[in-house]
Image (cartoon, helix red, strand yellow):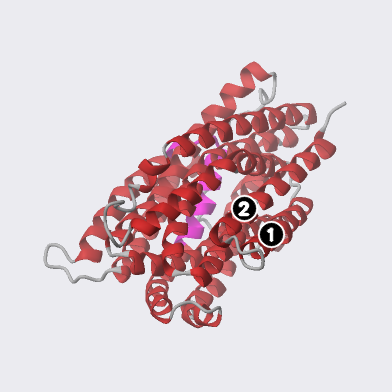
Amino acid sequence: MQVYGDVGRDWRSEVPATLRLATPLVVTNLAQMALGTTDVLMMGWLGAEKLAAGALAANMIFPLHYFGLGVLGAAAPIISQALGARAFRQVRRTVRQGFWVAIALGLPASVALWFSGDFLRLIGQVEQSAVWAQEYLRIALWGFLPGLWYVVLRSFTVSHSRPRSAMVITCLAIAVNAVANYLLMFGHFGLPRLELRGAAIATVLVEVLMFGALLAFVLWDRRLRRYRILGRWWRTDWPLFHEILRLGLPIGLSVLAEAGMFAISIFLMGWIGTVQVAAHAIAMQCAGIAFMIPLGLSSAASIRVGYAIGAGRPAAAWLIGRLAIALGLLIGLVLAVVLWLADRAIVGLFLDPTAPGDIQAFGLAVGFLHFVALFQIADAAQGVTAGVLRGYKDTRVPMLIALLGYWGVGTGAALLLAFPLGLAGAGIWTGLALGLLCAAGLLMLRFYRLAAVR
């Protein structure tokens, strides 16, 4: 097995090591986001009303998926610390229990998605949009559990510094998803025109194929197959099951707080109008794509910090954390400039600025994209710092920070600015920016107080 003793030796060696791990993760995250972007682009070809319904559906499944991703993300620091301490048997046990935790999360989430239409009506969404969104979700939920299992396997491979397998699989999945959407959404080559239902079927197909492909790689790879992760998979290991939940639930709630803030924002936008929802969905998609870059760095930093802590080297962990945050701030600055300067070109990928039905949505989306550009530095900082803290297995305080920043400040400010103060969509996006800024500042302060080596 590989020894991770050189981790955090000095900044000249650590920066390249972190970037080597982060780069495939960034590509994987961007490819994962491209799957959703492909859906949004093709839904836009169905018209603004179908795009709005698809956006509502996505924002129902989005918080549940990211909550599960956050909880199961606890597997990565557990595995990386076990590797740093050379406790290899714990690695296998963690993967197996991760599968069972995924089942415990996936079943109730699927039930919630089945009855999503009732919830959308309850919060005042347009009836037809609620009907179309529910049709989509009742199909898409069948891919939810395989998607969670894929997250567990990805944590396993990435913790062994083998991120390229997931990267290749996810990139190939983009093509599969695009072709399946083309055939099923629009009824080409004699197939029925299923529109949003076709997009849902394509999503299920892609989730199942991605999990199957990564599992096949793990069982084939000479180094990873030694763990025999499917051997006696039914055996219970309640202490480790509970440890994943103990660490993962705060991570999941932190992720859910941020994802929920953005998901609630589209429901708030729905109170303003359907055109605003369509424009908001485009800006949200761009924000999500941009965040995939610091998120990849965040995952790499979490694993590198975990190696150092597992090996009993707190000074190395402190160095890794500072370097990762600095890189995150630089990435956020670059993203802000790109989004601001390329605003109309980016929105033009989704909507035709000359089409009579899209003119208003196009202008709104350009304005919302400026807000996305402005909060990039804060978003990158909070994402990377949260990942660094997870490497320390520090999850409870970051959870409280997330709840305060995203719900207390972010959602509260969005409600206040949008409606009582009359700023409408601009008020909602200002609130989102304030929430991210608050979380970033408090998380960096937490890292300094927890990890500083004096």
- Give amino acid for label 1: Ala
The quarter in which the N terminus is drawn is top right
Which residue is painted at 75% across and 39% down in the image? 444
- Residue 2 located left or right of residue 347: right
Earlier residue among tags 2 and 1 = 1
- Give amino acid for label 2: Thr
Residue 183's quadrant in the figure? bottom left
**Which element carries disc 2, helix, strand or loop?**
helix
Residue reaching furthest to the left: 190
Res. 337 visible in picture? yes
What predominant SS class does the magenta segment belong to? helix
- Residue 422 located left or right of residue 287: right
Which residue is painted at 27% across and 69% down in the image? 195
Q: Which residues are magenta?
A: 146-165
Marks 2 and 1 in Cβ contact (< 8 Å) = yes
| Label 1 sits on residue | 413
Residue 191's quadrant in the figure? bottom left
Q: Nearer the viewer, residue 381 or 22?
A: 381
- Residue 95 located left or right of residue 440: left
The quarter in which the C terminus is drawn is top right
Res. 233 visible in picture? no
Q: Can you give x and y, in whole percent of width and height, for residue 235 in the image?
A: 60, 63
**Which element carries disc 1, helix, strand or loop?**
helix
| Label 2 sits on residue | 430
